[in-house]
Image: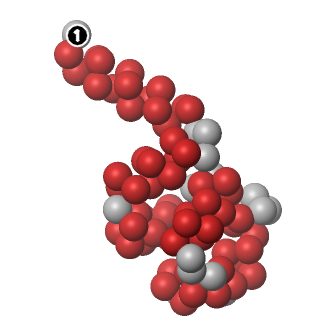
Amino acid sequence: MNPKVLSLFLQLSGISQHQLAKMLNVSQATVFNWTIGKHEMKYTHYESLVDLIGEHNVFLLEAQAGSNEVIAADLKKRLKERL
């Protein structure tokens, strides 16, 4: 997950890095490193986070954080299915 998206999630949800760490069974330092882009989130942790907050909310957070690649990929996929 993009560090901007993760930081936005934490800000909007009102939970702390420590609380998210407990939910994902990782250390607070790990969450901190994800938010600053020092380490990338493992796919298993990403899946757990998506399960917690929902795919639609992840999409909205990515759009809000300026992750235009996600929007572009979704648009292309939807249009390709119609062509």
Helix, strand or loop at label 1? It is loop
Residue 2 x, y percent position in the rendering: 63, 52
Q: Which residue is mark 1?
A: 83
User: Can you give x and y, in whole percent of width and height, for residue 81 in the image?
Assistant: 22, 21
Position above or below: 55 against 9: above
Residue at x 70% of width, y 77% of height: 30
Measuring 44% from the left and 48% from the top, which residue is drawn there?
A: 60
Q: Is residue 5 visible?
A: yes
Q: Nearer the viewer, residue 34 or 9?
A: 9
Q: Which residue is at the front of the view, 14 or 27?
A: 14
Query: Residue, x 38% and y 25% (percent of image)?
Result: 75
Amino acid type for the residue under numbered disc 1: Leu
Snapshot colouring: secondary structure
Classify residue 78 by image quadrant: top left
In the image, is residue 18 above or below residue 32?
below
45 and 78: which one is in front?
A: 78
For the view shown, which residue lies furthest in the left direction?
82
Is 35 positioned to the left or the right of 26 in the image?
Answer: right
- Based on the displayed image, in which of its 4 quarters is residue 57 positioned? bottom left
- Up the image or down, 61 lies above or below 81; here it is below
Does the rendering let one see residue 26?
no
Quadrant of the image for the C terminus? top left
> Going by the image, does 50 lie left or right of 9?
left
Query: Residue at the location (34% across, 62% down)?
Result: 54
